[in-house]
Image (tube, rainbow, N blue to C red):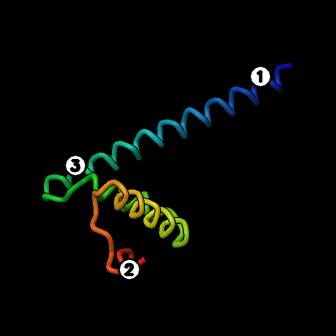
Amino acid sequence: MQVAADQLRTIIERIEHLEEEKKNISDEIKDVIGEANGLGYDTKAIRTIIRLRKKDDADRKEEEMILDVYMKALGMRQPDLFDEAA
């Protein structure tokens, strides 16, 4: 049973190491976001752009289209010229 215990310990230590790396990267991202904020950039917009860039074009366009339809339905955005003609 010693071999299994050694393997388990190795796996756990690898995961712990990766968790520490993940924390360090997260801290670095926070630092960069703070830097952007200090330079006057809107950090919510930056985070949104990063989230959108992770998606492929079709998914991003579909999300934008649905958001646009919902916002128009709620009166948060003016209908397009083509929407009025319909």
Mark 3 or mark 1, which is nearer to you? 3
On-image quarter of the C terminus: bottom left
Where is 85 relative to 31, above or below? below
Q: Earlier in the sequence, mark 3 or mark 1?
A: 1
Of residues 43 and 86, the one nearer the viewer is 86
- Give above or below for 38 relative to 54: above
Marks 1 and 2, the one that precedes in the sequence: 1
Q: Amino acid at mark 2?
A: Ala
Q: Residue 34 — which label?
A: 3
Q: Name the residue rendered at 61%, 31% in the picture.
A: 13
The secondary element bearing badge 1 is classed as helix
Disc 2: which residue:
85
Q: CA distance from mark 3 to mark 2?
A: 46 Å
Q: Quadrant of residue 75?
A: bottom left
Give whichever of 3, 38 is nearer the camera.
38
Quadrant (top left, top right, bottom left, bottom right) of the N terminus: top right
Mark 3 to mark 1: distance in Å? 43 Å
Q: Could you say where residue 74 lies in the image, as x and y percent from the top left?
A: 33, 54
Question: Image quarter for residue 67?
Answer: bottom left
Say if mark 3 contacts mark 1, CB within 8 Å: no
* Residue 2 in the image, given as x and y percentages of width and height: 82, 20
Q: Which comes before the other along the chain, label 3 or label 2? A: 3
Circle 2 — which element?
helix
Foreground mark, 1 or 2, reads 2
User: Which residue is rendered at x = 54% and y = 65% of the image?
Assistant: 59
Image position of 70 (left or right of 78): right
Q: Position of residue 46 (x, y in %)?
A: 30, 58
C-alpha separation, residue under disc 1 versus residue under disc 2: 71 Å
Residue kind at label 1, given as amino acid type: Ala
The residue carrying mark 1 is 5
- Number of numbered discs on residues: 3
Tell which of 16 and 48 is nearer to you. 48
